[in-house]
Amino acid sequence: SKVILRADYQPPAYWIDTVELAFDLDPGKTRVLNRMKVRRNPDVTAQPLRLDGEELNLARVLVNGQGTSFKLEDSQLVLENLPEGHEPFDLEIFTTCAPAKNTKLMGLYVSNDSFFTQCEAEGFRRITYFLDRPDVMASYTVTLRADKARYPVLLSNGNLVEQGALEDGRHFAKWVDPFRKPSYLFALVAGQLVCREQRIAARNGKEHLLQVYVRPGDLDKTEHAMNSLMASVAWDEARFKLPLDLERFMIVATSDFNMGAMENKGLNIFNTKYVLANQATATDTDYSNIESVVGHEYFHNWTGNRVTCRDWFQLSLKEGLTVFRDQEFSQDLAGADSARAVKRIEDVRVLRTAQFPEDAGPMAHPVRPDQYLEINNFYTVTVYEKGAEVVRMMQTLVGREGFAKGMSLYFERHDGHAVTCDDFVQAIADANPESPLAQKLDQFKRWYSQAGTPRLKAAGHFDPVSGIYSLALSQSCAPTPGQAEKLPFVIPIALGLLDANGNELTTGMHVLTDATETLTFPGLTAAPVPSLLRGFSAPVVLDYLYTDTELLTLLAHDADPFNRWEAGQRLATQRALGHIRNESVAPADIRLDHAFIEAMRVILRSDKLDAAFKELVLTLPAETYIAEQLDVVDPQRIHAVREAMREQLAQALFSDWAWAFEAHSENGAYSPDAVSSGRRALAGLALTHLCLAARSSGDSVWPGKALQRFKDASNMTDRFNALAALVTSGHALAAQALQRFHAMFKDEALVLDKWFALQAGAPDRGGNILPVVKQLMNHADFTLRNPNRARSVIFSYCSGNPGAFHRADAAGYVYWSDRVIELDTVNPQVAARLARALDRWKKLAEPLRGAAREAIARVAAKPDLSNDVREVVSRALA
Ligand code: HT7
Ligand code: ZN
């Protein structure tokens, strides 16, 4: 295992034109016959053919029907005596593998007695020997054979061309994919599945068959996924003129899956979490995640599948672009401007709480990384979410129409090919030659090559004599691993100026390209309030020393809803930081000022704002976000201060919360639309605060109401919010509610995940959570082998509950290292994600810092670690 460098890219020495795969599916020993047409790449000097393969048993290799000599070297099958010249030759390879033993869930594996595959990024080599790299695109024909009673459904990519019975109760199905594809998009599924079907007609009148496959019993949870798929097809046609290019498009759900979903051509495979929903089992958040993941995978059909990546360093070519597309899709579906803004705020919240820390930590890497040891470690928030922000900036710089034109040019140029991030930016720029993107193209590309979050400093000065307001801007970017010096970025800054009464004086867009620039605004009579980086127009940290008065003006009046929310977050963050730093005041004695509380009350009571927006404003910044604003971090203090602030808001706004709860609780028919889900979210937040207030007052009215609501709720959102209100407020009624919840949903795996996660993520009171987590792991329903279940307990504690995890006695860290080591033997990908929980250990206050280092060193000292975990822990210690 060695580090792979982007700079070392070489085109393949051979091309594989066609692949005929025949599977005899058996959980213990599956036989795979792989017949390929291979030819030398005329552009590359002659060399042996090196095929990738992992955990395969090789039985036979034939070249043009004849046996041939071969070597097995470092997980590669090396063939030296191949026909000369550039004519295609037949290569036949027969191997077996053991799907039932495959706990890594990469390649071919068994889940609930069905077969599934996961080939991205390098899983196809666990199925057969192959040039397992995305720039080798081939045409696939696949024959599946299996026991008919046990595996009645046999699926692969493309179209079903033949099926029938075989001897001994077996049957077969033959699938032909009309599109050439890289091996990572190969898929097969076999098992006892049922499906919801929908026939649709495209704009050109062509018919398509859409199918969502699930286990028998789950069919009543497929309507929303199907609706989301139909909406995705319609949206891509309407917004980008990109049609569905297949007669048949299938989604299959499995409960054992490393990630969210996979865009295999015509046969998407999904984690059940992103397919199954009905009002009794899924929350509004689940509904909205399903919509965006179904959209995301569908949109990959063009951005990823029709045009794919030349190599894995270009991953953001498909992922950043496709996240951008799914974000736009969800915004467009949300409808009203205010609902779009809510979605934007949610996306930025993810970026700032997850990606900004990544960009400041040991795993920081450019959107287009330069090196990796294990590519699975680079399916990151940087490649995905920051990548999406980079695409969004392109749209901002060329305009919405210009961007659509650029997309068309991109497909005109590259359809059917494996290309690079540069090719994408070039197409968008070439379609918009007058745009600031085209004019600053090379500089813009630094967003792909330089890691780290830029800091944008802004300082205003008003000269009452000349009436000129000047805004001095400067940008910088801290060093990241391997990149000491950074050059200036192209930063689009959407801005507005408000007068002291909140009236908008001017708005505009400035594209900052130099390290420092000063903007001037003449003709003013008083110092304005600047509203900067509206809509979060660039993924940067904005440093502007806002006064409370300015922030209160923005919170009350800014025409840009994002910056309205942002002003509220800044007010809260400033207060939290002040209290965290002032160690002479115990969290219990913290007092929030009148101005802040009143501003929050006004938002909560507003008759102009949507409930969803209010919920976002009234939610305090996350603990991880607050931690990023500090040089030295004491997670327990951050937690205590944030909790104290919540309790204060709970008490000070008690009657307002009570009003909010009553006014937003309704018992009409359930619908997951933006307005209804916003109302439920606000009612849920209100109930949490009412239970928190009861905590200090000792009053049991609201906890009693929460329990009643928990029992009576007609949908999972209300039920779960009520349960969470009891659990997070630490009320005695929580125990019976939890017990009842488990009894109600004992057969619903995804609901049990919520039950586990809620307890592992609950606020720590006197160190009680770690013992709870250990108990949960002993629960009959717990298993380390199922990634969703492992995440629901272990990740909810180690990554989702900093106040409980960072214990002074270091027991949280010992638990973490034990789990990383244990998980690594089962599923290295999941283990490596868990390993990232201590990424930011260097910021921790002593003695936590030393204890965390020791725990990481303990993992690193383990021999035989996977590349996945090895890469994460060695970077952390570097
Ligand atoms: N493109 C998909 C990535 C993915 C994946 C990667 C590594 C290991 C397992 C995986 N499952 C899915 C998901 C996506 O971005 O759409
Ligand atoms: Zn994706």
Image (cartoon, helix red, strand yellow):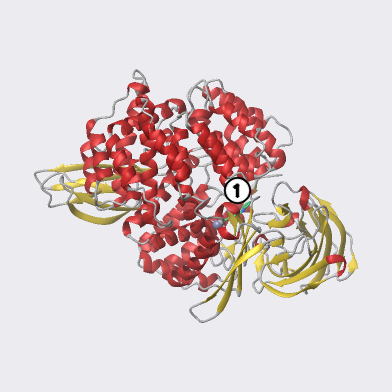
Q: As drawn, which residue projects farthest toward the bottom? A: 205
Position of the C terminus, as image quadrant, is top right
Q: Is residue 846 left or right of residue 342?
A: right
74 lies above or below 410: above
Rendered location of residue 644, percent (x, y): 36, 28
Q: Give the residue displayed 70% in from the left and 54% down from the top.
A: 123
Q: Considering depth in this image, is 598 or 522 the residue closer to the camera?
A: 598
Q: Is residue 846 visible?
A: yes
> Residue 616 appears at what percent x and percent y?
36, 45
Q: Is residue 131 left or right of residue 287?
A: right
Mark 1 is surrounded, within 10 Å at the Cα level, by few (under 14), some (14 to 19) or many (20 or more) other residues, namely: few
Q: How many marks?
A: 1
Extreme residue in the right direction: 67
Q: Quadrant of ligand 2?
A: bottom right
Q: Amino acid at mark 1?
A: Glu
Vertical arrangement, residue 752 with respect to residue 124, above or below: above
Residue 206 falls left or right of residue 356: right
Looking at the picture, how far across and down is residue 536, in whole percent? 35, 50
Quarter of the figure with the N terminus: top right
Question: Disc 1 marks which residue?
Answer: 748
Give the quadrant of residue 209: bottom right
Q: Pinpoint residue 294: horizontal percent, then vertical percent.
A: 53, 60
Dot 1 falls on a residue whose secondary structure is loop
Find out if the beta carbon at label 1 lies less than 8 Å from the nearest ligand 1 atom.
no
Front residue of 27 and 3: 27
Residue 373 in view, yes or no: no
Q: Which quadrant of the structure image shows residue 33?
A: bottom right
**Vertical order, 74 against 799 (above or below):** below
Q: Residue furthest left?
A: 465
